[in-house]
Amino acid sequence: MKFSERVYRLCKRIPKGKITTYKIVAEALKSKGYRAVGNVLNKNRNKDVPCHRIIDSKGHLHGFYSGIKNKERLLKKEGLKIKNKGVVDFEKYLYRF
């Protein structure tokens, strides 16, 4: 199975209202390719893959093909509280595989 398919399959497991990081996704795939995960997700156009639920390890929203504002809107729609500068509350929302 291709790396991209493995990333998409794993991302589909993240429940609504939760987020995870590029690093956590990579580690779950037994990889250190955090940026590779980001590159794969930046190319995603499949609405069944909730790539808007992936953020960086500092809690910032990054790399969404339709823009950061749309990523923030989708996360808010799922009930997440977004703080200043797009930082979400890790303790409350972080999902680990």
Image (cartoon, grey):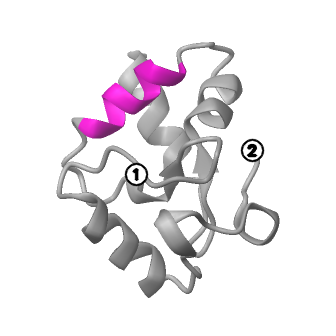
Task: Where is residue 47? Give x, y as percent.
Answer: 26, 60
Q: Which residue is mark 1?
A: 51
Callout 2 crowding tier (Cα within 10 Å): few <14, some 14–19, many ≥20:
few
Q: Quadrant of residue 70?
A: bottom left
Q: Which residue is mark 2?
A: 97
Residue 21, above or below 6? below
Residue type at tag 1: Cys
Instruction: Please provide percent x and percent y for residue 54.
Output: 50, 50
Q: Which mark is residue 69?
A: none
SS label for mark 1: helix
Image: 53 above or below 70:
above
Of the numbered discs 2 and 1, the one sitting upstream in the chain is 1
- Magenta region: which residues? 34-42
Would residue 24 be found to the left or right of residue 65 on screen? Answer: right
**Chief secondary structure of the magenta span?**
helix
**Mark 2 vs mark 1, CA separation in Å:** 15 Å
Q: Give the structural element (helix, strand or loop) at label 2.
A: loop
Residue 3: in magenta span: no
Judge whether 58 appears above or below 91 on screen: above
Picture coordinates of residue 13 (x, y %)?
59, 53
Displayed quadrant of residue 36: top left
Q: Residue at x 63, y 31 (%)?
A: 23
Residue toward you, 77 or 8: 77
**Classed neighbour count for the residue bearing mark 1: other residues with Cα under 10 Å, few (<14), some (14–19), many (≥20):** many
Q: Is residue 68 left or right of residue 2?
A: left
